[in-house]
Structures are given as structure tokens and as C-alpha cells.
Amino acid sequence: MSLPHAILTALLEKPSSGLELTRRFDKSIGYFWSATHQQIYRELGKLEADGLIRTLPSEQPARGQRKSYEVLPAGRAELARWTAAAQEPKPHRDALLLRLRAAAVVGTAGLEADLRRHLELHERQLAEYRQIERRDFPPGRDSPEDRLRHLVLRAGIDLETFWTQWLRHALEEFPEQPGHGTR
Amino acid sequence: MSLPHAILTALLEKPSSGLELTRRFDKSIGYFWSATHQQIYRELGKLEADGLIRTLPSEQPARGQRKSYEVLPAGRAELARWTAAAQEPKPHRDALLLRLRAAAVVGTAGLEADLRRHLELHERQLAEYRQIERRDFPPGRDSPEDRLRHLVLRAGIDLETFWTQWLRHALEEFPEQPGHGTR
DNA sequence: GTCCACATGTAACTGGTTACATGATTGG
DNA sequence: CCAATCATGTAACCAGTTACATGTGGAC
């Protein structure tokens, strides 16, 4: 039950069309709640039917024609309600940890290459986060809203930092392969 | 496509019935790949149909009657294949970070209590992990398999450590509420 | 006028969740 | 024999994924 609220948040930050939302989900909000354009269009339809958002009056609604939405008061109220409501944390699912556990039983053959690849992906993501931090949160002048958003970004940075360190540590468990290069 | 492999790993560690698996998924493997008993029974059926596992010959198969499974060579081979295969990391989804982001728009009213609750849950999980570490991985004598399993547990410990620290940091953003007590 | 990028949408499928049903075994 | 518990299973549903379909407008 989180995708509609992710969309409401994005629309409150700036009224948008479905495709614009899709693009914005590829950054920013999508870093911790990703969604494809199919999901977004489906959800926009539901939100409109529920009276939480509406198309901007100036737009003509037609297929293939751009259609922008804005949040109605009922939508903002629902988002505030959801934000404050107690929620159980979802159980984690991490395939990489599972694979390490499986490797303890069937052996580590072939695993190292993919660990290195994951390390690289996390390093790239970390670099991207740090760049966003430099760009959007220069030191010394955060508004209260910016401080919350910065906090969220810090979570992303710290998580990626953890993964890069953990993967480097994990790779030390692997015997050096002659001919494979060991960075 | 990970649940069947989680089950294969668990069954290789020890042949079990559906309910035993369910219980073991509440600890150990379930910490990073949770599953309910309905999922597990469904998946056991599929794995058996695919010839990756079989019921222990000594068991009589009947409803309400306990039925234990063991992994067949084809199952072990499939697990080894999957472990070594390259896999894309799944996009993250974290409702708590989303809520913080929403709070930047609609305000933080009511959020603090649930953050404290989450902090407590993570602290409890961290304590549990540390206890498992003391119990299962006493310093100085890890076999190669144990070192991999220990590595996985360390990931859990470090992740919970991150979350407790981050949540404490996040709570500093909230104004002190008279009458609510500030720990 | 044709092709391509933009934009919105439908349909089928998969994996996970929730609620419920049924049989076997054991303690009182 | 009855209730509680153990154990296996069915069914309906929901969220997310993948593949595909359709319409619009501008570049050439």
C-alpha cells in the first residue's frame, strides 16, 4: 500500500503527467520506491477515481495526449494519515545473502565474478548519491524540509557504503584465481 | 525465483518436513528470505514435480501426515547453477524512507512514535543477531563454510547497526514533545 | 506521407499475502 | 470422546513484472 503514497508525495512536490512521474521515479523517490510506467498509470487511474487527485483543468484528456495531475485536499489528508500511521516493517529479502548461504553448501564456484559486478554497481550508486548530496545539500543552509530529505539521502549513502565494504570483505574469502586478476 | 533455492539450501543443510522448514525460516535463512507455510508447501510441491527433491522413502504420504523431503542430485545441481549465475540486484523498496520523504511535504505530525517503535524493533533484532554470533561463531575456529555463514550474519548485524544509528539520528530532527518523554 | 519519439494504456503472468479448510495425534 | 495442537493443503486476492497495443505530433 505504498505506491499510491509515493505518487501523492511526488505530485505534491510538483504536479506532473504519468511519463514525467516515471522519469522522476528513475531518480529521487524511485531510489527507495521504484515503479514502472504501467504501475504508475494504473495507480493514477485509481487515485483519480478515489478523488485524491485530478487532471489539471487546462488539459484535454485523450489517448496519446499528455495529461497532468495535481493532488486534491483529500489526497493530501490521506498522505498525512498514512505518514503518521504505525506500520510493520516488511521482512527483508536479499538474494545475494541467500546465494552466499547457498555457497556454503554447494561451493563458491563461479560466484566471485558476480560479487565483483555487484560491488561495482554499488560503488556507482554511491558516487551518484554523493554527487546529489553535493548538488542539492551544500553545507550550512538546510531548511526543515531539506533536512528531512537530506536525512533520507544519507540513509542511501550509508547503505551503499555498507554494501561496498561488505562486498570487499566477502571477496577476501575467495581464493586468488590465477589469470583472473585480483584488482 | 529465489524461494525454491532458499528451500533447496535449507533442505541440504537438513532434510525436513514443510512445517519444520517453516519454523527454520522464522530464524536463520528467513532473516533474509522470509516465507509463510503456504508458500513453502506450494513450492515443495513444485520442486517435487520437477524432480529436484523427493519425500524420504520411509514416509507415508497422506494429508495431515508428516512428510519429509530430501534434495536429489538434480536439485543440488540447480542450486549450484543458480548460485553462480549473474543476477541483477532488485530495486529497493523502503516504506520508512518514503514516509520521511512524505513528511517533508505534509509535516512530521504523529511520525515520531512509530520511528521510536522501529528503533526498538531494530535494537531487538540486533541483540538477537549478536546472540547468535556468540553462540554459533565463537572466535578462532571457523571452517570455510562457517566463514561464509558468519559473513552473512555480519551483514545482518551491520545492517541493523546502521538502522539503529540512522533512526536515532532521524529522531534528533524532531522537536522535543513536552509530556512525551525523550528517552 | 512515413518514420520515430512521445505518451498513455491493456493483458497476461508471477510471487507473495490472507483467510480458510481438513486430517491426524495427543492429553485430559 | 472432546478439545487442542500439529501438519498439510486450497482459494482468492493483490502488487509488481513483462510484453504488447494504440494514438499523437514533429522531422524529414
Image (cartoon, coloured by chain):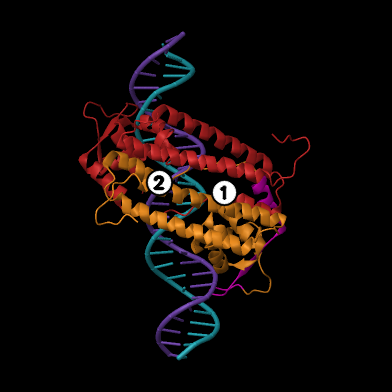
Chain colours: A orange, B red, C purple, D cyan
Answer with the quarter of the image where residue C24 lies: top left
- Residue at position x 48%, y 32% in the image: B130
Q: CA distance from mark 2 to mark 1?
A: 29 Å
Image x and y of residue B24, in percent = 39, 32
SS at mark 2 in the image: helix
Q: Secondary structure at mark 1?
A: helix
Q: Is residue A151 left or right of residue B79?
A: right
Segment colored magenta: A61-84
Inspect the image, locate mark 2, and give the three-letter code of the amino acid beneath it.
Answer: His
Q: Can you identify the residue that label 1 sits on?
A: B95
> In which chain is the residue bearing label 2?
A
The relative height of residue C20 versus residue B91 in the rendered view (above or below) is above
Quadrant containing the C terminus of chain A in the rendered view: bottom left
Q: Nearer the viewer, residue B139 or B54?
A: B139
Number of marks drawn: 2
Q: Splitting the image into 4 quarters, where does residue B150 fall?
A: top left
| Chain letter for the residue marked with disc 1 in the picture | B
Q: Residue at x 40, y 54 (%)?
A: A118
* Left or right, residue A112 beside residue A146: left
The image's mark for residue A169 is 2
Asked if residue A100 lies left or right of residue A17, the reply is left
Percent position (x, y) of residue A49? 62, 59
Mark 2 in CB contact with mark 1 (< 8 angstroms): no
Near-viewer residue (A38 or B177): B177
Q: Nearer the viewer, residue B91 or B135?
A: B135
The three-letter amino acid code for the residue at tag 1 is Ala
Residue lying at 27% horizontally and 41% vertically, measured from the top left:
A106
Residue A135 in sight in this render:
yes
Q: In the rendering, at what x and y percent does residue D18 appear?
A: 39, 60
